[in-house]
Image (spheres, helix red, strand yellow):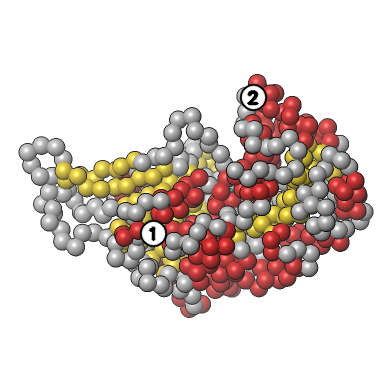
């Protein structure tokens, strides 16, 4: 196992939602599991003036809800000692010089540095420029790596412009474009499942697979992130990034090796093979919606338009679905359906693969109702699991069939359960790019959604709505090619029929 060199993790935007909800808890969990070497320091940078001690107290407060007091007490003694704080209010012209003097001058900050851009995407170029101008991105005494959150740009052109601005101060090996979905256990398991087993490869293609569905639905609304979400919408926020990456991993060819470049070469190839959507076919391939008020988990919640910071006439989509085709030998003619939504009925992220029906229905008299095709389902969250649905004979004298679900849940009791960020943060410290996006992947994903973005930004008079707490707008079903294709909302057997909805 490679060891982590002493380093400093600088979190830009330490007071923001991502740092509070994901980064700090992930770093603390690494501490809990003794995965952070002693010589790692963490420097939070935020707008608010604060002392190191005040920030440490704030961080402790963030962790209190997640850990029992005795667990927190034991590990926070070590964790708290790593924490430092630097205020960089936007109106303070000197703050980056002071940051440089602190980082380069104080012995508690090892010269290998990770700069985590946990800030609004619009601020990326400005901050990189500031860091670059004070010399903090030069790899003189140690390595300097920059983690860039998604979305990388707002469309293809802006992604290319952002890239050019990064290249003024950084080379490609210093850039870690993060898509935290690639750090999720099941997502990595898709690769193990596909490439560690020989029995899947012969059926993983157009001859046996009817279609693929990739879903991310969540109960939450915009949760105080309207400022960002209004400009992004669900298509950019989830579909262009996370869901497109899941598609790439399900559909890519086996790589030459698991090295970062070989893996990313294959992902790019499959993303480039996605059939371009012309502007005139956008409505046949994409569907958007916005949540109205409704009831989520028994609580009445306001509509998107009533959320703080949302324009009264906003047509920003909180639900986006797309049908994509991959024009290559493996996938020609197989639709990939992608959807994501906020304020939906349930929190679920899953990849559901439906197989074709047997060529002859020899058992039609033995089955109840319509034929049930095989499904393979990879649940990403809330539970990481692997399920397969198959037909078996019902015990007894008659030949009757029923569908069973083989539950190959691979998580065993007592095994470590990490969120996505822990592993990805370790990868950055280790210098492993495998689960980070290369610029050509990002560009290929933008090329797919750009026509949809264009058309939706012109059609500003109307957007379909769906009640909060539902499964999204009904009209989304028009994306399906046939009547026997339908969104699979649940991985249990009850979710296997259209009648369930
Ligand atoms: C983020 C999006 O990238 O992913 C959020 O910006 C979304 O809108 C989140 O809620 C979902 O991630 P997770 O790990 O909670 O499923």
From the viewer's side, name the closer residue of 472 and 307. Answer: 472
Residue at left offset 83%, top offset 32%: 53
Percent coordinates x, y for residue 110 in the rendering = 80, 44
From the viewer's side, name the closer residue of 225 and 42. Answer: 42
Q: Where 103 sits versus 37, above or below? A: below
Percent coordinates x, y for residue 269 in the rendering = 50, 69
Check disc 2 and report the residue beneath it: 71
Q: Where 250 sits versus 224, above or below? A: below
| Ligand 1 is within 8 Å of the C-beta of the residue at disc 1 | no
Which quarter of the figure is the N terminus placed in?
A: top right
Check disc 1 and report the residue beneath it: 212
Report the Cα–Cα distance between label 2 and label 1.
42 Å
Q: Which mark is residue 11?
A: none
Count every numbered label the image shows and give the total: 2
Percent coordinates x, y for residue 412 in the rendering = 44, 33
Q: Residue furthest left?
A: 397
Mark 2, Cα crowd under 10 Å, few <14 / some 14-19 / many 20+, is few
Q: Is residue 471 visible?
A: no
| SS class, disc 1 | strand
Q: Where 33 sits versus 15, above or below? A: above
From the viewer's side, name the closer residue of 1 and 262. Answer: 1
| SS class, disc 2 | helix
Residue at left offset 56%, top offset 69%: 444
Percent coordinates x, y for residue 72 in the rendering = 67, 26
Q: Where 404 sits versus 149, above or below? A: above
């Amino acid at each position: 196992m490679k060891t982590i060199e002493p380093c400093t993790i600088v979190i830009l935007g330490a007071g923001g939602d991502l740092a509070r909800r994901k980064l700090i808890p992930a770093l603390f969990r690494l501490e809990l599991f003794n995965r952070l070497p002693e010589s790692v320091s963490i420097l939070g940078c935020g707008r608010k003036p604060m002392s190191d001690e005040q920030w440490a107290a704030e961080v402790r407060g963030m962790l209190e809800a997640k850990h029992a007091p005795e667990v927190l007490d034991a590990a926070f003694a070590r964790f708290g000692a790593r924490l430092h704080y630097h205020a960089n209010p936007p109106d303070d012209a000197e703050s980056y010089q002071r940051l440089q003097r602190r980082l380069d001058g104080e012995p508690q900050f090892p010269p290998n540095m990770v700069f985590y851009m946990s800030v609004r995407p619009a601020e990326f170029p400005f901050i990189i420029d500031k860091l670059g101008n004070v010399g903090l991105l030069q790899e003189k005494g140690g390595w300097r790596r920059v983690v860039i959150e998604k979305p990388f740009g707002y469309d293809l052109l802006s992604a290319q412009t952002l890239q050019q601005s990064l290249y003024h101060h950084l080379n490609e090996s210093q850039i870690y474009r993060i898509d935290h979905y690639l750090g999720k256990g099941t997502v990595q398991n898709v690769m193990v499942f596909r490439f560690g087993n020989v029995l899947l490869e012969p059926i993983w293609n157009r001859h046996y697979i009817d279609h693929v569905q990739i879903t991310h639905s969540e109960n939450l609304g915009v949760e105080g992130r309207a400022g960002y979400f209004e400009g992004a919408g669900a298509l950019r926020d989830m579909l262009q990034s996370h869901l497109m990456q899941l598609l790439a991993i399900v559909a890519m060819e086996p790589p030459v090796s698991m090295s970062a470049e070989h893996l990313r070469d294959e992902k790019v190839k499959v993303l480039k093979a996605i059939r371009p959507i012309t502007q005139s076919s956008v409505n046949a391939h994409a569907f958007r919606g916005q949540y109205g008020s409704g009831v989520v988990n028994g609580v009445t919640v306001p509509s998107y338009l009533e959320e703080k910071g949302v324009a009264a006439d906003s047509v920003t989509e909180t639900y986006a679905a797309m049908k994509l085709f991959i024009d290559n030998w493996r996938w020609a003619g197989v639709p990939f359906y992608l959807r994501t939504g906020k304020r939906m009925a349930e929190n679920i992220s899953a990849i559901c693969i439906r197989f074709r029906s047997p060529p002859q229905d020899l058992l039609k008299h033995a089955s109840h109702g319509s034929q049930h095709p095989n499904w393979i389902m990879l649940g990403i969250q809330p539970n990481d699991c692997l399920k397969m649905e198959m037909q078996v004979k019902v015990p007894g004298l008659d030949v009757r069939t029923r569908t069973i679900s083989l539950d190959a849940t691979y998580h065993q009791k007592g095994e470590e359960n990490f969120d996505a960020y822990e592993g990805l943060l370790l990868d950055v410290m280790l210098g492993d790019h495998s689960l980070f996006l290369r610029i050509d992947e990002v560009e290929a994903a933008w090329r797919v959604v750009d026509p949809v973005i264009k058309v939706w930004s012109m059609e500003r008079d109307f957007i379909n709505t769906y009640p909060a707490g539902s499964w999204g707008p009904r009209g989304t079903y028009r994306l399906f090619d046939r009547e026997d294709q339908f969104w699979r909302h649940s991985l249990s057997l009850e979710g296997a029929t259209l009648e369930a909805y």
